[in-house]
Amino acid sequence: MKTVGVAILGLGVVGSGTYTILRDHREFYRRTQDIDLSVECVLEINKQKALALGIEENRICGDIAEVISNPAVDIVVEVIGGVEPARSFVLAALHSGKTVVTSNKELFCKHWHELEAAARRTNAGLYFEASCVGGVPIIRTLIDGMQANVIHSLTGIINGTTNYILTRMAREGAGYAEVLKDAQALGYAEANPSADVDGYDAAYKLSILSSLAFHTKVPLENVYREGISHIALQDIAYGDELGYVLKLLAIGKFDGHKCIEARVHPAFVRKDHPLAAVNDSFNAVYLQGDSVGDIMLYGRGAGALPTGSAIVSDVIYAATHGEAKYSGFKNTEHAEAGIRFVTDFKSRYYVRFTAKDRAGVLAKVAGILAKYNISIAELVQKDGSSESVPIILVTHETTELSVRAAVEKIAALDTVEQVDSVIRVEG
Ligand code: HSE
């Protein structure tokens, strides 16, 4: 039986989950995979953390050079997160010909081209299933399962923390700051919670997933991003009355040739849409392929064991496949020449504004919308004070730039106090 040596860089939530799986399933992998996965060393400055997991003291390293120079280490698992020092550690491992398995979406999204070039030079493996959508095998699906298809769209809930927060806000009316603390305690949230609530984490993942799905680099700079920190509880409640659930969606679209759309933002989806039922820290990705039709993958998008599951599956894949497989597209830093990124995308829109309760207000608003060729699908006036009332309208499909221009004009009306929120409606 082949013994394969593994090193784990970092024993945070994902590192600990990975170690636990490797330790507890060692015998199972011997039996089912005919390999012995041996954790040769861990790189962790907090020795107590390692000892608490049962790792022998002589396997705890404090310096990356010890890991790289250890001939028993074949596969380096990077679960430190962030760009540095993770990037230097991964490059050092690849330069020495060791295979790398990583969960680091920020590093991968920003430096994929550089890491892949380094891996190709030494024929080292480079695996990143755990970088996107936790334990859900979306990368393997895109690389191996959907190759027959032109994928025209990918719509996902790909951040567990924000989905957990939005679910609890909708269920309990809790404020997001309060629920964010619980998400941190459960090990879903990034070290800097802004990465989750401001949509960066989802944007990193969408950049990686769209590049694979559309066979061309979709750089982070071309992913439109909005987070959930400005979301008001009233909008979740009003949306519920209108038949919608609020989600942080990641949307990628491809015309099959040159036009790509990539955006992350909160959006209402109808309650009967499959993504509406994806709650708590669960993630899902809904794919549309030209031959297969619609596919949805669903599972835990964050947490120690689900993400550890993706890491260990990559470790097993690397240990049982001789030849490394790299991205099938031109993996450059920026987008390929000729690719056009659509920014004036189409959607429906929910707009809430506060207006004076007087004759003629709605006529003026309707006039502005008509000027921008925006058609109203629904309009609701809620109870307000004697002076001002909240008004909610939902448009038919229109374009982003028309809505932005119309909203600016509506906000400038002297009978409108303010435009409170603009939320896209998808699906
Ligand atoms: N913070 C991430 C999330 C962890 O909430 O989805 C998994 O990438």
Image: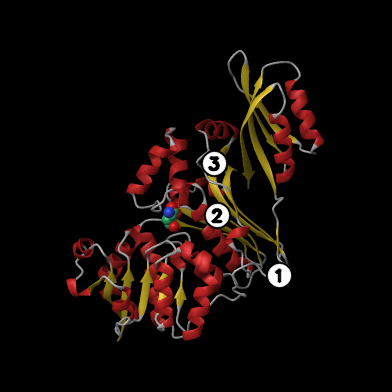
Question: Element type at marker 1?
Answer: loop
Crowd band around label 3 with a 10 angstrom C-alpha radius: few (<14), some (14–19), many (20+): many
Q: Residue at x 20, y 61 (%)?
A: 48
Residue furthest to the top in view is 386
The residue closer to the viewer here, 201 or 221, is: 221
> Residue 402 appears at what percent x and percent y?
75, 42
* Residue designated by label 1: 337
Quadrant field for ligand 1:
bottom left
Crowd band around label 2 with a 10 angstrom C-alpha radius: few (<14), some (14–19), many (20+): many
Whether residue 296 is visible here, answered yes or no, is: no
Q: Residue at x 76, y 38 (%)?
A: 374
> Residue 159 appears at what percent x and percent y?
48, 52
Give whichever of discs 2 and 3 has the lower sequence position.
2
Q: Residue at x 74, y 28 (%)?
A: 365
> Residue 140 appears at what percent x and percent y?
50, 70
Indicate yes or no: mark 3 CB to ligand 1 under 8 Å: no
Q: Is residue 396 above or below residue 190?
A: above
Q: Amino acid at mark 2?
A: Gly
Question: Element type at marker 2?
Answer: strand
Q: Is residue 333 left or right of residue 14?
A: right
> Residue 206 appears at what percent x and percent y?
56, 59
Give whichever of discs 1 and 3 has the lower sequence position.
3
Contact flag, marks 1 and 3 (Cβ < 8 Å)? no
Q: Which mark is residue 156?
A: 2
Q: Residue at x 70, y 50 (%)?
A: 345
Q: Which mark is residue 246?
A: 3
